[in-house]
Image: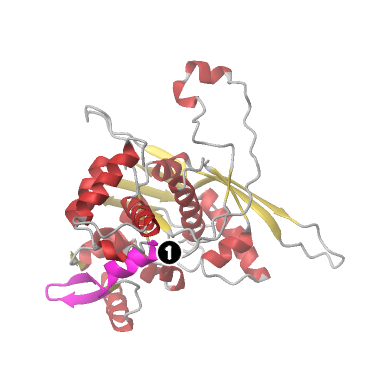
Amino acid sequence: MASVPAPRPVPKSGRSSKTSASSETRPDLVADPEETDFFVCDIFDALPKDDLATMEHPVFSLSTRPDLRVLNYVHNGVEIEVTPSVKGLATIHDKDILIYCISQLIAASNQGRPISRTVTLTAHDLLQATGRETSGDAYRRLTAAFQRLAGTRITTNMADVETKDGTCEVTTGFGLIETWRVVRRTKDKTGRAGRMVSVSVVLSDWLYRAVRSKSVLTIDRGYFRLRKPLERRIYELARKHCGRQDGWRVSLEVLHLKSGSASPRRVFRRMIRDMIQADALPDYELIEEPGDKLRVTPRPGLIERSRLREGTLGAALGALTPDTLEAARALAPGHDVYALESRWRGYWAASGRPVVRSADKAFLGYVRAVVSGQG
């Protein structure tokens, strides 16, 4: 089994032993024992994770120029309005910051570490993890991205928690991040600002709840190599709707709507055809079909590569069936079943035990042990 780099030491985050007066009357404000005052991003090999809601619905601008439009999206009962600040809408490349933070939090949670929606990171690690250069311009662009993420406001009836009787519809307004703070070295003798020493980001409560409920999917690291905004958006939709299934068919009309593209339909169709010809998406192939439709299919070997990518080195145990993975989700709601599978295979490979008769039954037994606190 491949060795995993040891995490950097995490500074101790003190928590006040006193309970605030508001928490005495507000049970939802009582400190969660699984949370700290802040979380330090220190996991070098965290798998990239994207949240399901923004993979499904268009929230980020695909423009490469400042986008000052108010975006409105309505589909299957979901309504979303995205309002920019004077700096413009948050872009799909700005989303890299959120993906990095989500990835770090999920990896830490899978390790049993306490997490927080206040995330501290180093700009250099973020830029490297998302495939960006680490020049002075890159650090300045990062600051602009924080400004757009903090300034973009979302109003939506997209529920993260359903009402018990289904009689109420909740409309929520929030930003993608609440606050951000950059610590730089002091200016040098030439008057130039020093490099960022550390960055602190407070994620929106809406996004943090997605992390806590593990409403996320693993994405390929090749996503960060996609430079065209539409390529990134189509990959997200392919990953969300196709996953590891045989395929996903969608009309160009619906794809155009779900992508959030501002291009006219005929231009969008040409862009999709160019994308088909370039064949640059990781994990998925795009095929145009009659009737103005698109079919998305996983590339050969996707499942095997995904398991290797997630550290599933116990290959001798054999592949798990889709039904087994669904059963695992039912047994362990809120858990990342692929992370559970990775741990299970790793433990089995390290134990030296013989190959089991039924990998599916053995895995479900492991999931039950985890849920009961014995795993």
- Residue 111 x, y percent position in the rendering: 46, 47
Query: With respect to residue 154, does 128 lie above or below?
Result: below
Residue 127 in which image quadrant? bottom right
Q: Residue at x 16, y 72 (%)?
A: 292
Q: Residue furthest bottom?
A: 277
User: Viewed as shown, does residue 58 lie left or right of 291?
Assistant: right
In the image: residue 350, left or right of residue 332: right
Quadrant of residue 197 within the rendered picture: bottom right
> In the current view of this chain or complex, which residue is farthest to the right?
189
Image quadrant occupied by the N terminus? bottom left
- What percent of the width, then of the height, locates residue 114? 51, 40
Provide the residue designation for mark 1: 1
Q: Secondary structure at mark 1?
A: loop
Indicate left or right for 1 with 300 as reference: right
Task: Name the side, left or right, on which 337 lies relative to 186.
Answer: left
Q: Is residue 256 magenta?
A: no
Where is residue 93? Give x, y as percent: 48, 64
Whether residue 262 appears in this view of the structure is: no
Q: Position of residue 21 (x, y in %)?
A: 57, 17
x 60%, y 64%: residue:
141
Q: Among all residues in the image, which is located at the extreme left?
A: 291
Give the color scheme: rainbow, by chain, secondary structure or one colour.
Answer: secondary structure
The one nearer the camera, 103 or 22, is: 103
Task: Name the amino acid type tagged 1.
Answer: Met
Residue at the image point whose x is 62% and y is 31% from the top = 15
User: Where are the magenta residues, as a range?
Assistant: 285-311
Above or below, 299 against 24 in this view is below
Q: Badge 1 local density, few (<14 within 10 Å), some, or many (20+)?
A: few
* Most foreground residue, 344 or 145: 344
Query: Which of the 4 image quadrants contains residue 5?
Result: bottom right
Figure disc tally: 1
